[in-house]
Image: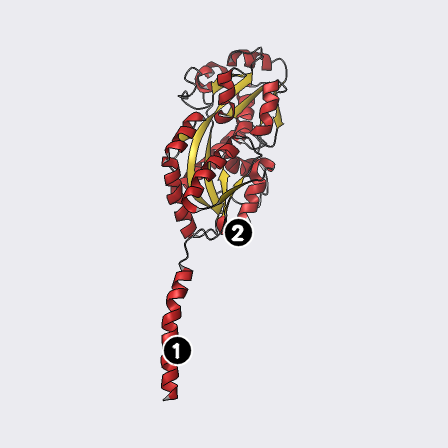
Amino acid sequence: MISTFKRALSVLALGVTLPFASIAQAAEWPTDTVRMVVPYAPGGTTDILSRKVADLLQQQIGTVVVENRPGAGSTMATGQLARGGRGADHTILMASPGHTIGPVIYKNLPYEPVKDFKFIRNVIEIPNVMVVPADSPYNTVEEFIEAAKTKEMTFSSAGVGSSIHMSGELFKTMTDTQMTHVPFRGSGEALPALLSGDVDVSFENMPTVLPHIKSGKLKALAVTSAEPSPYLPDVKPLSKIGADLGLGDFVTTAWFGLIADDKMSDQAVETLQTALDKVTQDQSFKDFVAQIGGEPATEEGDAFRDYVEQDVQRWQRVAGQAELQ
């Protein structure tokens, strides 16, 4: 009798505790603060975009903090992400072409750019712009190339392995000109050197330089996209300006999207994708993208992974042409 009574209590206790266990197991992500890592210094395109996305994203999922971790052309922060560890399920990184260029020019990185990550969503794409200081004596691509064949020029970038750096190296190789690369820890640090004339030229991301082009502090000689940008309609693509100068195949653009360590839960990825869909449809985000001269991107999940894999292959070809491998 006592034994039967004990069994009944055990069954009752199990019935009471199981629903609570199920609720605990099904706790919705996020359960902690989400950290969005920017692998460049404050002030550049990646940083500005990340802060806008974080502001809108936290309206959907809760607190999102932005952390700048610059170094080694974004590979330092990316390597930390790939190692995972504590907080991996609540850490995301705003990746850009540095993610696909780094493994091409740096040997023995502790991660693979595709297989070691989960690809959440691409956010925007932007062209780079060939810009010179306002007081530069060069007003056309042809004038710049002619001068660079007789004297050494300098070009700045957001760091070794950025799309800005690689665009400059490709230009140098395709035009057989003399150009020395001057890397900085991000576009925020590179821009003052360009504005002051300490460097001769840059192939900067459009969001960084568009306000200064409009204000007259910089001169835009060309865009690096295949077609003109609607935000600089009078500035022609390098590939069309320089068809007779060896630049007929010159096309480089930049993308910016969120990735995570491969161990991030599927629930977290799906929650982020749903939230980011709402972020990119927000009118303030659309206005922001237009303001910085970007174009919205739509790839997520496997489609984003395939996009990144193709970008790796593209920069491998560019690095080969520029003899950087």
Asked whether disc 1 touches disc 2, contact meaning CB atoms under 8 Å apart, the reply is no
Identity of the residue furthest to the bottom in this view: 1
Residue 58's x, y, as percent? 44, 43
Q: In percent of the image, x 52 and y 20: which residue is there?
A: 212
Q: Amino acid at mark 2?
A: Gly
In depth, the one of 203 and 135 nearer the eye is: 135
Q: Earlier in the sequence, mark 1 or mark 2?
A: 1
In the rendered image, residue 157, in percent from the top left (x then y), is placed at: 57, 27
Q: CA distance from mark 1 to mark 2?
A: 37 Å
**Foreground: 80 or 32?**
32
What residue is pinned by disc 1? 10
Which quadrant does the C terminus fall into? top right
Binning the other alpha carbons within 10 Å of mark 1 as few (below 14), some (14 to 19) or many (20 upward) gives few
* Residue nearest the observer in this picture, 182 or 5: 5
Element at badge 1?
helix
Foreground label between 1 and 2: 1
Measured as percent of width and height from the top left, residue 7 is found at 37, 81
To which quarter of the image does residue 274 belong?
Answer: top left
Label number found at residue 72: none
Residue type, mark 1 in image: Ser
Q: Quadrant of the N terminus?
A: bottom left
Q: Secondary structure at mark 2?
A: loop
Residue that carries the numbered disc 2 in the rendered image:
87
* Protein image colouring: secondary structure
The answer to whether 259 is drawn above or below residue 124 in the figure is below
Taking 87 as reference, is 226 left or right? left
